[in-house]
Amino acid sequence: MASSGAVPFWRAAGMTYITYSNICANLVRNCLKEPYKAEALSREKVHFSFSKWVEGKPEKPSILLFTSHFSSSVSFNFIDRRFRFNFR
Amino acid sequence: MAMAAVLRREGRRLTQPINALHSSLISQDQAPHGSRSISTQVVRNRMKSVKNIQKITKAMKMVAASKLRAVQTRAENSRGLWQPFTALLGDNPSTDVKKNVVVTVSSDKGLCGGINSTSVKISRVLHKLNSGPDKETKYVILGEKAKAQLVRDSKKDIELSLTELQKNPLNYTQVSVLADDILKNVEYDALRIVFNKFHSVVQFLPTVSTVLSPEVIEREAESGGKLGELDSYEIEGGETKSEILQNLAEFQFSCVMYNAVLENACSEQGARMSAMDSSSRNAGDMLDRLTLTYNRTRQASITTELIEIISGASALEGFPG
């Protein structure tokens, strides 16, 4: 298996299996031909608001939103951080 | 004021919301001095508003029905994602561990019957069952509604809350990113996901799926409990068993979450559909009763006027022209 050698590396980069498999899935999606590619990429939109609670109070929620267009390269994880806005 | 009495008696027979009508009728008693009969304006306005509400609930029912159709097939297809995991790792809700995380799945919007309170209730039960002297149980909440309910009595135990999931149609990428965020932010030995499993448009089964952490799976497998068969599997490739289990547990969580979120969205639409159906029916009933009251009052006022005219005329008859 080609991927077996890669495991320690993405683990060391702080990625989980979910992130890793998402990047792989995205690479496959990008290999599609045109009408299907745009369709598949537009389907995978991510949007939710996330807030951590500390001692019974929610912290400022961060809104997480991006589409797969952004993450067409392997920088999925970094995009994830870059598109995290803080809303008051 | 015989008509007012009739109206009031009718009003009492109607159910709760009509109290507004009732009280506004009482104020009709203090109508401008010298006015002969009460106005039926109040009832007419009331009828109009009930009719409008009925229109709204009917429209909401239609919307819920079309959304349900879209999400139902996806929810049913997503069941194939967790089934292999349950076949391999089993589903062991009774596993006793130290760090429990209850993931409560609920909806962002209301008007969908009791599905949110059910999942909150089940989550509370799980919380109680899994609390002990050296154990801790935390909540991770999906959706506004469960958050609003759990904030009241157990806000100290809330670890994370996630909302606004359904801005776009649900998809696996979104749920997996969400699952990833949960995994990165909580420490767990067992994740217990509470959601309403869609059974039919009127039936939702509150369900708990348990995802164990890789360490707990390994421990259970070694002690030869329910997971004892896991050792009979051969592992291909260069990875160790713990690595494989770590990957599996993470992937299992994202798959189970995907199914849970879809099932819950499906149940939400189904519940909303039946709730809106019964409220349109109630609005129809109320409208019928109001129409009856209105017509009866109108009839009574006509009768009274006729009696007044006739008796006036007959009183005059005795006098010479």
Image (cartoon, grey):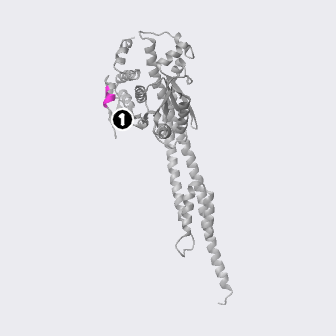
Name the side, left or right, on which B302 lies relative to B255.
right
Residue at image x 55%, y 60%? B21
Q: Is residue A80 magenta?
A: yes
Residue picked out by circle 1: A62
Q: Quadrant of the C terminus of chain A?
A: top left
Q: Give, as a three-letter code, the residue at label 1.
A: Ser
Furthest residue in direction right, as rendered: B318
Q: Is residue B270 visible?
A: no
Q: Position of residue B154 (x, y in %)?
A: 49, 37
Q: Position of residue B316 (x, y in %)?
A: 65, 85
Q: Is residue B250 above or below residue A1?
A: below
Dot 1, crowdedness within 10 Å: few (<14), some or many (≥20)?
Answer: some
Residue at image x 59%, y 62%? B294
Q: Position of residue B105 (x, y in %)?
A: 49, 33
Q: Which residues are magenta?
A: A78-82
Q: Can you tell which quarter of the image residue A6 is in? A: top left
Q: Is residue B92 above or below residue B195?
A: above
Chain where mark 1 sits: A
Q: Position of residue A62 (x, y in %)?
A: 36, 35
Q: Can you tell which quarter of the image residue B207 is in? A: top right
Name the side, left or right, on which B175 lies relative to B44.
left
